[in-house]
Image (cartoon, grey):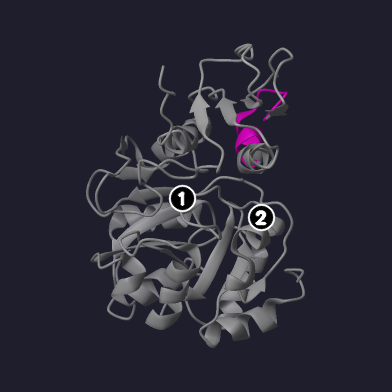
Amino acid sequence: MPAAHGIAEAAEVLRAGGLVAFPTETVYGLGANALDARAAARIFEAKARPSFDPLITHLADATDLPALVGALPPTVAALAERFWPGPLTLIVDRPAVIPPIVTSGLDTMAVRVPDEASARALIRAAGVPVAAPSANRFGQLSPTRAEHVVRGLGAAVDVVLDGGPTRCGIESTIVDARGPHPVVLRLGALAIEELVAAVGPVTVRQGSSGQPVAPGTLAAHYAPRTPLRVVAGAVPAPADGVRRGFLAFREGPAAGYAAVEVLSPAGDVTEAAARLFDALHRLDAAGVTEILAEPAPDEGVGRAINDRLGRAAATWSPPAP
């Protein structure tokens, strides 16, 4: 249902322990009452998400965080004041009221305030914090349109609020700022440069082969069903008769590909990020055998684009000779 008209009904579903997919400025989230362990368990079941991968808890307002967890470390408070609402997820100590299933047993909790009016209205109307990872099957492409959610999860979701395409198109940046030196655990829609301007130098530490310390940090993730590999640029299509798709940053390659998607003809990394998953969804549906992807410039949110491409390609291996 349209996000503007379905808030009250969707809020009631959340209070009753149901699942609601809703738009944020980043991607669509699959929400459940974060205070209800059984409701949170439904998220893991619907997504086929492993229980060791924690969820992000969403709040309606920045002032809700200290009310939930108590006094905030100074840098956490500063980042929340500067960037919330917005595509920044912060790591805080888990309060007792949040069931351990939401944090996959960790003593920490990932939390943010989305910069999407309908999302905040939904959380406010529900009257509870909302646990919400991306609304897709685990490890697959994140949804940036309501139809991506319906196609991927179907009847596993009780309500899908349609707010049109998401603005950022890529997930939030995750930062652990509890200590003296902020650590970026996942690159995302908030650029490193903006963080540095706000709090000074940060450390980037991402990727996990064991239990993740933050959502979306597994080495292999965000992948289309079609095998994807990253190439140096707009390379010519191999002349082997294989149907391939190409994901270009600024200019499409020469003829020879069965399908081509260009992320930003203007060369704008923000525009490219907003179009990334939508373009990959189209290539994934194009009936190609393989997708070749050109990286973005490694600056601003271009770093997050390249991070997602690298994770999507992590399961690719060259064919046997």
Is 111 placed above or below 40 here? above
- Decide which of 85, 158 is in the foreground and name it: 158
The amino acid on which the numbered mark 1 sits, given as a three-letter code, is Gly
Residue 68 location, quadrant? bottom left
| Residue 13, horizontal then vertical, whole percent | 60, 83
The amino acid on which the numbered mark 2 sits, given as a three-letter code, is His
Please state if 36 lies on the left or on the right of 287 as rendered: left
| Residue 90, horizontal then vertical, whole percent | 38, 56
Q: Which residue is mark 1?
A: 139
Q: Residue at x 57, y 77 (%)?
A: 124
Residue 307's disc number = none
Q: Residue at x 68, y 82 (%)?
A: 8
Q: Does any portion of residue 300 appear in the rendered image?
A: no
Residue bounds of the magenta highlight: 263-274
Find numbered disc 1 in the image and state the secondary structure of the residue it sits on: loop
Q: Which residue is mark 2?
A: 148
- Decide which of 196, 248 is in the foreground and name it: 248
What is the count of numbered marks? 2
Residue 151 location, quadrant? bottom right
Residue 24 location, quadrant? bottom right
Q: Residue at x 30, y 51 (%)?
A: 177
Please state if 144 lies on the left or on the right of 92 as rendered: right
Is 294 placed above or below 135 here? above
Residue 202 in the magenta stretch? The answer is no
